[in-house]
Image (cartoon, grey):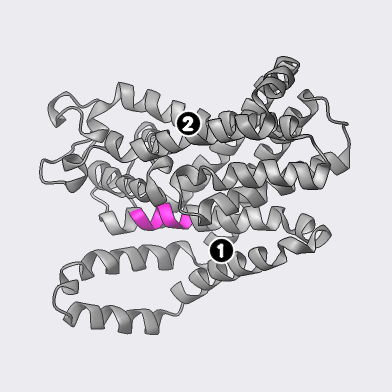
Amino acid sequence: MYNHFAMPEENPVVKKSILQRMLPGVLLGFLVLIALSLFGDVHQLTEVIGKFNWRVYPAALAFTFLNYALRFVKWNFYLDQLQAGKISVKNSLRIFIGGFPLAVTPGKVGEALKGVWLNQVSSMPVGRGIAAVVAERISDGIAVLLLSSLGVIAYPQYWPVFVIILTGLLLAVILSQIRPAALFLLSLLERMPLVNRMAAGIREFYEGSFSLFRPKATLLGVGLGCISWLGEGIGFYLILLGLGMDAGYRLAGMAVFILSFSTVVGAVSALPGGLGAAEASIAGMLALITGASPAVAAAATLLIRMATLWFGVLLGLIVWAFSPHMIGLKDNHGAAN
């Protein structure tokens, strides 16, 4: 069993640097920052952030850590379901956190690299590793939709988007469990020229998805997702308090709803890290639902995205700095165990 990371020369991920793939997301992040500054008026936005109670920010980051910790528990549970073999906690954590910056690649396609990393440390087929990534995303999607359900009931204008996305996610889970139909389609793919070269990987992906979307695994994944993303919602509530908004159950409920719903909007947009879509949703909903001024809405959006998306990217970059071979910046010879 491998206990190190290697990036083979023939791997297409190496040919096009992961850092290059992240560039559009980084540029989009700067554009979003400019857009939020204009939305909130630079002078007023600076004034609002200057008055922010920074003592609440460590607590908000702590809730983000809670989110990551519970998602890591789910990640390991998924690997156990896939019978990945012995993957050390160190390597599992390295892959999990090292995947955070990949969220800012277009369509988050860079996250498929986690399947390659899993293959290198456990010989798990890449397709099954990618199934773990997809299952994590789908279970998180269902979880944040459940967290936002009460808010959608209170604000029915969001029903169409809510129903369409939830239906799509549930269909993906249900269809994965209709095994005879899936095996029939796979057998057809294996007979088709051109496509048949990918059939083995697609079959491994399906087998992994079938295991991870069994009822017990799905319920556990969604349950952990609800608790973990609720933590980020509470962190957002603390940020709103730090901006001077009135404490109370109503504001807490709206904070969880707004952040959860905006997370889904960002995910389905297929934009790198949901950038632009998530920020527009958070700032817009804050202004419409809570009556926050544009400056406060923009400040809250900046602060929560720094405490969530960009905080995770920073942690992942730190992992890359200590394990540059993960992204092909060094060859296998200097890889850390």
Q: Determine the residue positioned at 44% across, 45% down.
A: 272
Q: Determine the residue positioned at 68% across, 20% down.
A: 43
The amino acid beneath tag 2 is Phe
The amino acid beneath tag 1 is Lys
Position above or below: 69 against 85: above
Region of the chain picked out in magenta, as a range: 130-135
Q: Position of residue 92 (x, y in %)?
A: 38, 38
- Toward which corner of the image does residue 209 lie, by quadrant? bottom left
Choose between 143 and 179: the one closer to the eye: 143
Would you call the spot at circle 2 few (<14 residues within 10 Å), some (14-19), or many (20 or more)? few
Q: Is 179 included in the stretch rendered in magenta? A: no
| Badge 2 element | helix
Q: Can residue 24 be seen in this view?
A: yes
Q: In the rendered view of the protein, which quadrant contains the C terminus?
A: top left
Q: Determine the residue positioned at 76% across, 16% down.
A: 51
Q: In this view, does 288 lie to the left or right of 125?
A: right
Residue that label 2 marks:
30
Mark in the foreground, 1 or 2? 2
Q: Where is residue 179 in the image (x, y as percent from the top left)?
A: 40, 79
Residue furthest to the left in view is 9
How far separated are the C-alphas under marks 1 and 2? 42 Å
Q: Determine the residue positioned at 67% across, 28% down.
A: 41
Position above or below: 226 against 217: above
Q: Is residue 160 left or right of residue 179?
A: right
- Toward which corner of the image does residue 157 lie, by quadrant? bottom right
Would you call the spot at circle 1 few (<14 residues within 10 Å), some (14-19), or many (20 or more)? few
Residue that label 1 marks:
216
